[in-house]
Amino acid sequence: MKKVLKTLFLAALSVGTMSTAFAESAGQAGAYLKMGVGARALGMGSAFTALADDSTAAFWNPAGLARLEQSEGSFMHADLTMDREYNFFNYAHILKDKSGKKTGVVALSHMTFGVDGIPETRLASTNWDGTALLTGDEPATRSDGTYKAGENVWIFSYFKDTEKNTFGSYARKLSDKFYGGVNVKYLKHELFTNSASSWGLDFGFLYEACEKTTLGLSIRDLGETLEWNTASKHEDDVPVTTTFGVAYKARSNLTLAADINKVEDMDAKLFAGAEWWLQDYAALRLGSKDGDLTLGASFKLDTWRFDYSYADETLGDAHRISASKKF
């Protein structure tokens, strides 16, 4: 076991230092793409790259979809601090040949992140009495776009900053213990009257090292550059994320997992988590996402599973609820 752990550690270090030629710089574009989906995975500190055994694997590691035995759909909703709203839903479908043998898995996923109620303000054109402005940066305080000292800034409208990611997945078993998957993604960012969009790719791999240990590798957000429809044609590069993970089944009802997550041009981060099924229908989770505490719980009812997660984040406590159903 020590030899296995040593190998995993060395491999994780190698993955953590990987770079890519698909993006020129990291930047902050597409930050929501790093937040993760599914309260189950988030309750485990986002250490899900090697576990990835439900339909949310489409996000974490598309190769994990190939291990599904039933078609499955998932949904997550989160109202976050600072009026942020975050949603995800997807459906993964088992492909079979004429004899009923599984040949692969396809999935369609959609995630949205946005901030609503952003006030639209404008710079004033003149003073309220028609005289010229002393400087050119006074805000409009009246509906006609003029400025008068002592009055509140005029709000012309409210708008929403919305980011969307729609992606299709395909995964299959490549050999006896090896699985592969790919996502083709379309990203769109809408802000007031302008928008930007981009295509991108994710790749994922899973290897069942032994009965209890699984290794995972995902490379996300390849080739994603958001080009704005402004006069300057400004571009925002989405940084590539590379993650190496290991999942270990300590008992039949207890799984331990760890990920080393490396976002381009940023330091590597360690995610770790545990999932303990008390009964066939109830589970508890504990995790650490780069030092931030995460907790989670699940409850199964027939073909449904309901998940909850809590995270102690920099911008405040985050609570997420998700549900999944097998078909």
Image: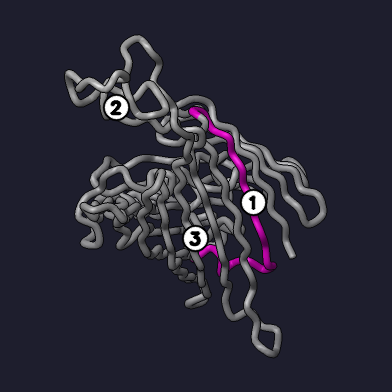
Alpha carbons under labels 2 and 3: distance apart? 39 Å
**In the displayed structure, does residue 324 sit left or right of residue 289?**
right
Q: Compare marks 2 and 1 and give the one earlier in the sequence.
A: 1
Q: Which residue is mark 2?
A: 124
Residue 65: x and y in percent read 56, 65
The segment highlighted magenta reads 63-82
Q: Residue furthest left?
A: 134
- Asked whether disc 2 touches disc 3, contact meaning CB atoms under 8 Å apart, the reply is no
The answer to whether any part of residue 314 appears in the image is: no
Identified by mark 2, the residue type is: Ala
Q: Which residue is mark 3?
A: 166
Q: Compare marks 3 and 1 and give the one earlier in the sequence.
A: 1
Q: Secondary structure at mark 1?
A: strand
Instruction: Name above or below for residue 124 compared with residue 320.
Output: above
Q: Which residue is mark 1?
A: 75
Q: Nearer the viewer, residue 215 or 203?
A: 203
